[in-house]
Image (spheres, rainbow, N blue to C red):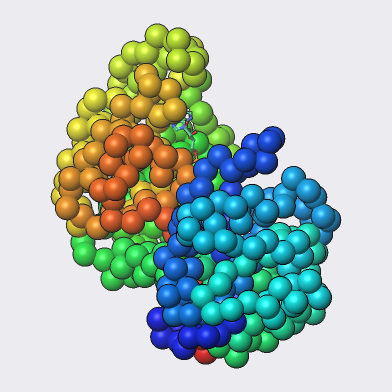
Amino acid sequence: MNSIEQIDIAGKKVLMRVDFNVPVDSGGNITDETRIRAHIRSIGYCIEKGARVILISHMGRPKGERVEKLTLRPCAASLSRILGKEVPFVDDCIGEKAQAAVASMKAGEVILLENLRFHIGDEKNDPGFARELAKLCDVYIDDAFAVAHRKAASNSAITQFVKVCAAGFLLKDEIEYFNKAMKDPARPLVAIIGGAKVSDKIGVLENLVDTVNMLIIGGGMAFTFLKAVGNEIGKSLCEGEMLDKAKSIMEKAASKGVKVLLPVDCIVADKAEASAAANICPVANIPRESMGLDIGPETIKAFGDAVKEAKTIVWNGPLGMFELEAFSKGTFTIARDVAVSGALSIIGGGDTDSAVHKAGVGDKMSYISTGGGAFLELLEGKKMPAVEALEACGG
Ligand code: AMP
């Protein structure tokens, strides 16, 4: 896969797929610009090289209809402010308006086109729609890792119609960091998997036991595992239909010499509320009316010791209901342990990202992925269709 630095973009019309799917409030104001800022390196590089930068993105799920509240217009204003230069907005991403806007661009200018998904052709990976997009450019750059796991005309079919294609810095970094952690890691490689549901991450767990040296399981999903090995777990989260899967993962791990660390104690309460009285409880003695909402002190110590030994750490999913202070200690303490471990640390998933920031150590992690679903699919061992498309075009 070519990267943006390996191709000639000077003076070229560069069509860049970004992910500006930002949260917007009812007044049309962007409430978090992180996704826009994640592309500034690639956009800035193109400006510096004197390219004409045409940005395309989706927002929400308009399903081929023009839905005014899903317009990308606010992103153009936000980007203008961040770049300190005017970014004109064009209210269609294909057709005469888009072509005229591109034709009038000068070197080093940036424009943003309207939501790709106002046309159904994007989601359908429609070659006709991709051809229309391709008419706008000389070079195609994909920088949208967060959607790289889903085939769309703007990240797959388009590569058949543009001769020069490459990955932007964000997409390249995501793949490179992931490969460093999972393909040829410094060992021990420790995976920390938490969050609410086993069923969401079963493919991840199955794949990880083939690769990691140690699997740390926390969060709500740990209780299905604890039940599978014979504990009574009260009202804690449990997915009955996942008990056999949980057992088979433990068996597979044992047969491969992969150590699985489950909580030995937890913080229980009778309800998942800030006002609930929280108590420490060994996992063998969870009262029938209680639910486990965080890992306990013995577990924090055991998980922390494992993290200290690690040379590579991959983490997805909080270890407790960290949004409530009473149940945040496990996640925050382990986040700080990861931060000082000296290991290569790769963090993925919106909740985990938010948790490490709340713990005050977001900037101490080696890499925080921008893609929740895409990151999980990489952890499942799946290939990213958008990356395959870039590779296939020789770009
Ligand atoms: P996920 O999206 O699967 O990574 O799940 C993240 C959510 O899991 C967060 O909102 C946490 O509050 C929640 N969570 C973590 N641990 C627990 C737990 N022990 N019980 C209930 N929810 C939990």
The residue lying furthest to the right in this view is 65
Residue 355 in picture, x, y percent from top left = 38, 37
User: Observer-nearest residue: 156 or 135?
Assistant: 135
Q: Percent x, y for residue 82?
A: 48, 54
Nearer-the-camera pick, 232 or 122: 122
- Picture mark count: 0
Image quarter of residue 16 = bottom right
Q: From the viewer's perspective, tell me whether residue 104 is left or right of residue 148.
A: right
Would you place residue 143 above or below residue 342 in this image?
below
Residue 87, picture quadrant:
bottom right
Q: Name the image quarter holding residue 165.
A: bottom right
Left or right placement of residue 383 versus residue 256 in this view: right
Q: Residue drawn 41% across and 44% down?
A: 353
Q: Is residue 116 visible?
A: no
| Residue at 58 percent of width and 48 percent of height | 22
x and y, in percent, of residue 13 in the image: 59, 82
Q: Is residue 111 visible?
A: yes
Identify the residue at horizontal 48%, vertical 24% (top origin).
236
The residue at 35%/39% (across/down) is 357
Measured from the top left, where is residue 36 in percent x and y? 52, 55
Q: Is residue 293 above or below residue 255?
A: above
